[in-house]
Image: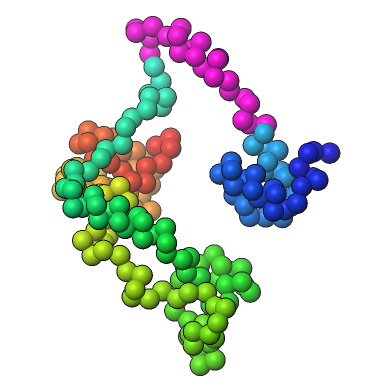
Protein backbone atom coordinates (compact mmCIF):
# COMPACT_ATOMS: atom_id res chain seq x y z
CA UNK A 1 0.00 0.00 0.00
CA UNK A 2 1.45 3.34 -1.09
CA UNK A 3 1.20 6.66 0.67
CA UNK A 4 -0.84 8.10 -2.18
CA UNK A 5 -3.85 5.81 -1.71
CA UNK A 6 -5.03 7.75 1.35
CA UNK A 7 -5.08 11.04 -0.58
CA UNK A 8 -8.04 12.41 -2.46
CA UNK A 9 -8.13 12.97 -6.20
CA UNK A 10 -7.80 16.73 -5.71
CA UNK A 11 -4.70 16.27 -3.54
CA UNK A 12 -3.18 13.87 -6.07
CA UNK A 13 -3.74 16.37 -8.86
CA UNK A 14 -2.05 19.08 -6.83
CA UNK A 15 1.05 16.90 -6.53
CA UNK A 16 0.95 16.09 -10.24
CA UNK A 17 0.60 19.76 -11.07
CA UNK A 18 3.70 20.61 -9.01
CA UNK A 19 5.67 17.96 -10.91
CA UNK A 20 4.31 19.12 -14.31
CA UNK A 21 2.70 15.73 -14.97
CA UNK A 22 -0.62 15.02 -16.79
CA UNK A 23 -3.78 15.26 -14.67
CA UNK A 24 -6.06 13.03 -16.77
CA UNK A 25 -7.31 9.61 -15.75
CA UNK A 26 -8.86 7.91 -12.75
CA UNK A 27 -7.42 7.81 -9.24
CA UNK A 28 -5.53 4.58 -9.90
CA UNK A 29 -3.95 6.18 -12.99
CA UNK A 30 -2.86 9.22 -10.96
CA UNK A 31 -1.29 7.02 -8.30
CA UNK A 32 0.53 4.95 -10.91
CA UNK A 33 1.87 8.09 -12.54
CA UNK A 34 3.23 9.37 -9.23
CA UNK A 35 4.82 6.03 -8.38
CA UNK A 36 6.48 5.89 -11.79
CA UNK A 37 7.83 9.40 -11.33
CA UNK A 38 9.20 8.51 -7.89
CA UNK A 39 11.02 5.48 -9.29
CA UNK A 40 12.64 7.39 -12.15
CA UNK A 41 13.55 10.57 -10.29
CA UNK A 42 16.27 8.95 -8.19
CA UNK A 43 18.02 6.98 -10.93
CA UNK A 44 20.71 9.56 -11.70
CA UNK A 45 22.47 11.49 -8.95
CA UNK A 46 24.25 14.77 -9.40
CA UNK A 47 27.42 13.50 -7.71
CA UNK A 48 27.87 10.67 -10.18
CA UNK A 49 27.38 13.06 -13.12
CA UNK A 50 29.95 15.49 -11.68
CA UNK A 51 32.50 12.70 -11.23
CA UNK A 52 32.04 11.54 -14.81
CA UNK A 53 32.36 15.09 -16.07
CA UNK A 54 35.61 15.67 -14.16
CA UNK A 55 37.16 12.47 -15.54
CA UNK A 56 36.80 13.69 -19.13
CA UNK A 57 39.95 15.08 -20.76
CA UNK A 58 40.14 17.56 -23.58
CA UNK A 59 41.09 14.81 -26.02
CA UNK A 60 38.18 12.56 -25.08
CA UNK A 61 35.25 12.31 -27.46
CA UNK A 62 32.12 13.92 -26.09
CA UNK A 63 28.73 12.64 -27.14
CA UNK A 64 27.08 15.23 -29.37
CA UNK A 65 23.64 14.50 -27.88
CA UNK A 66 24.85 15.60 -24.43
CA UNK A 67 26.09 18.99 -25.64
CA UNK A 68 23.58 21.76 -25.07
CA UNK A 69 23.13 23.84 -28.20
CA UNK A 70 21.55 27.25 -27.67
CA UNK A 71 18.51 27.88 -29.82
CA UNK A 72 18.73 30.63 -32.38
CA UNK A 73 17.11 33.91 -31.43
CA UNK A 74 15.54 36.31 -33.94
CA UNK A 75 16.77 39.84 -34.49
CA UNK A 76 13.81 42.01 -33.48
CA UNK A 77 13.39 45.73 -33.00
CA UNK A 78 12.16 47.20 -29.74
CA UNK A 79 8.63 47.73 -31.04
CA UNK A 80 8.24 44.07 -32.00
CA UNK A 81 9.61 42.91 -28.63
CA UNK A 82 7.11 45.10 -26.79
CA UNK A 83 4.29 43.82 -29.01
CA UNK A 84 5.24 40.18 -28.32
CA UNK A 85 5.33 40.85 -24.57
CA UNK A 86 1.94 42.55 -24.75
CA UNK A 87 0.49 39.62 -26.73
CA UNK A 88 1.84 37.19 -24.14
CA UNK A 89 0.07 39.13 -21.40
CA UNK A 90 -3.12 39.05 -23.45
CA UNK A 91 -2.93 35.28 -23.83
CA UNK A 92 -2.74 34.84 -20.05
CA UNK A 93 -6.02 36.71 -19.62
CA UNK A 94 -7.76 34.97 -22.51
CA UNK A 95 -10.23 32.25 -21.43
CA UNK A 96 -10.12 28.72 -22.76
CA UNK A 97 -12.71 28.52 -25.53
CA UNK A 98 -14.57 25.22 -25.41
CA UNK A 99 -17.02 23.72 -27.85
CA UNK A 100 -20.72 23.49 -27.22
CA UNK A 101 -21.60 20.38 -25.16
CA UNK A 102 -17.90 19.75 -24.48
CA UNK A 103 -18.68 18.40 -21.02
CA UNK A 104 -21.14 15.84 -22.37
CA UNK A 105 -19.07 14.16 -25.07
CA UNK A 106 -15.41 13.28 -24.70
CA UNK A 107 -14.66 13.68 -28.40
CA UNK A 108 -15.84 17.29 -28.28
CA UNK A 109 -13.61 18.06 -25.31
CA UNK A 110 -10.56 16.97 -27.30
CA UNK A 111 -11.30 19.09 -30.36
CA UNK A 112 -10.80 22.78 -30.93
CA UNK A 113 -13.23 25.66 -30.93
CA UNK A 114 -16.34 25.55 -33.13
CA UNK A 115 -18.95 28.25 -33.44
CA UNK A 116 -22.18 27.19 -31.68
CA UNK A 117 -25.10 26.64 -34.02
CA UNK A 118 -28.72 25.66 -33.66
CA UNK A 119 -31.92 27.55 -33.08
CA UNK A 120 -32.16 26.37 -29.46
CA UNK A 121 -28.46 26.72 -28.61
CA UNK A 122 -28.14 28.34 -25.18
CA UNK A 123 -24.49 29.11 -25.83
CA UNK A 124 -25.29 30.91 -29.09
CA UNK A 125 -27.96 32.97 -27.31
CA UNK A 126 -25.47 34.08 -24.62
CA UNK A 127 -27.44 32.67 -21.73
CA UNK A 128 -25.96 32.60 -18.26
CA UNK A 129 -23.54 29.97 -16.97
CA UNK A 130 -22.24 29.18 -20.44
CA UNK A 131 -18.55 29.17 -21.48
CA UNK A 132 -17.30 32.29 -23.30
CA UNK A 133 -17.33 32.40 -27.08
CA UNK A 134 -14.52 33.53 -29.34
CA UNK A 135 -15.23 37.10 -30.40
CA UNK A 136 -13.45 39.82 -32.28
CA UNK A 137 -12.58 41.52 -29.00
CA UNK A 138 -10.15 38.71 -28.16
CA UNK A 139 -8.02 39.49 -31.23
CA UNK A 140 -4.31 40.17 -30.76
CA UNK A 141 -2.02 42.83 -32.15
CA UNK A 142 -1.91 42.86 -35.94
CA UNK A 143 1.79 43.76 -36.01
CA UNK A 144 2.83 40.39 -34.52
CA UNK A 145 -0.04 38.29 -35.84
CA UNK A 146 1.23 34.98 -37.15
CA UNK A 147 4.58 35.15 -35.39
CA UNK A 148 5.90 32.26 -33.32
CA UNK A 149 6.16 32.99 -29.55
CA UNK A 150 9.93 33.16 -30.01
CA UNK A 151 9.50 36.00 -32.54
CA UNK A 152 10.29 34.02 -35.69
CA UNK A 153 8.01 33.88 -38.70
CA UNK A 154 7.32 30.22 -39.52
CA UNK A 155 8.15 28.82 -42.96
CA UNK A 156 6.93 25.35 -43.92
CA UNK A 157 9.70 23.08 -45.21
CA UNK A 158 9.29 19.78 -47.07
CA UNK A 159 12.77 19.28 -48.57
CA UNK A 160 16.29 20.55 -47.86
CA UNK A 161 16.23 22.96 -50.81
CA UNK A 162 13.44 24.95 -49.14
CA UNK A 163 15.90 26.12 -46.49
CA UNK A 164 17.86 28.22 -49.00
CA UNK A 165 15.06 30.82 -49.16
CA UNK A 166 14.85 31.29 -45.36
CA UNK A 167 16.34 34.28 -43.57
CA UNK A 168 17.83 32.89 -40.31
CA UNK A 169 17.55 36.30 -38.64
CA UNK A 170 13.77 36.61 -38.89
CA UNK A 171 12.41 33.24 -40.09
CA UNK A 172 12.40 29.70 -38.71
CA UNK A 173 11.64 26.37 -40.37
CA UNK A 174 8.80 24.00 -39.55
CA UNK A 175 9.15 20.56 -41.14
CA UNK A 176 6.00 19.16 -42.70
CA UNK A 177 4.20 16.37 -40.89
CA UNK A 178 4.42 14.01 -43.88
CA UNK A 179 8.21 14.28 -44.21
CA UNK A 180 9.94 10.95 -43.51
CA UNK A 181 12.64 10.34 -40.95
CA UNK A 182 15.55 10.15 -43.41
CA UNK A 183 14.66 13.35 -45.20
CA UNK A 184 13.98 15.03 -41.87
CA UNK A 185 17.49 14.18 -40.69
CA UNK A 186 18.95 15.74 -43.86
CA UNK A 187 16.83 18.85 -43.29
CA UNK A 188 18.10 19.13 -39.71
CA UNK A 189 21.71 18.85 -40.82
CA UNK A 190 21.23 21.45 -43.54
CA UNK A 191 19.47 23.79 -41.10
CA UNK A 192 22.36 23.51 -38.66
CA UNK A 193 24.81 24.43 -41.42
CA UNK A 194 22.79 27.52 -42.36
CA UNK A 195 22.08 28.50 -38.74
CA UNK A 196 18.31 28.11 -39.14
CA UNK A 197 16.15 27.13 -36.21
CA UNK A 198 13.78 24.18 -36.64
CA UNK A 199 10.70 24.72 -34.51
CA UNK A 200 9.49 21.11 -34.47
CA UNK A 201 12.82 19.32 -34.18
CA UNK A 202 12.45 15.72 -33.00
CA UNK A 203 14.73 13.92 -30.60
CA UNK A 204 17.00 11.32 -32.11
CA UNK A 205 16.66 12.76 -35.63
Seen from the viewer's position, the closer of residues 156 and 113 is 113
Q: Position of residue 183 (x, y in %)?
A: 33, 43
Q: Position of residue 47 (x, y in %)?
A: 55, 15
Which region shows up in magenta?
A: 39-61
Residue depicted at x 46% and y 66%: 95
Q: Position of residue 170 (x, y in %)?
A: 19, 47
Q: Is residue 181 left or right of residue 17?
A: left
Q: Is residue 123 left or right of residue 171?
A: right
Please say if 13 is above or below 128.
Answer: above
Residue depicted at x 78% and y 39%: 3
Quadrant for the C terminus in the image: top left
Residue 101: image quadrant is bottom right
For the question of whether residue 109 can be seen, the reply is yes
Residue depicted at x 54% and y 65%: 110
For the question of whether residue 157 can be seen, the reply is no
Please say if 48 is above or below 110.
Answer: above
Residue that sits furthest to the right in the current view: 1
Q: Is residue 36 a member of the stretch shown in magenta?
A: no
Please say if 141 is above or below 21.
Answer: below
Q: Is residue 51 a member of the stretch shown in magenta?
A: yes
Seen from the viewer's position, the closer of residues 62 and 26 is 26
Please say if 161 is above or below 204.
Answer: below
Residue 139: image quadrant is bottom left
Amino acid sequence: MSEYEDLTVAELKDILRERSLPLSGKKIDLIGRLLEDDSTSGDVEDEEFDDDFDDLDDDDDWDEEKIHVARQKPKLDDATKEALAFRKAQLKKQPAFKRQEWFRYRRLARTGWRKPKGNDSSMRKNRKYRPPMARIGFGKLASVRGLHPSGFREVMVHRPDDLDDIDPNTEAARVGARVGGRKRAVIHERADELGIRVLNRRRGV
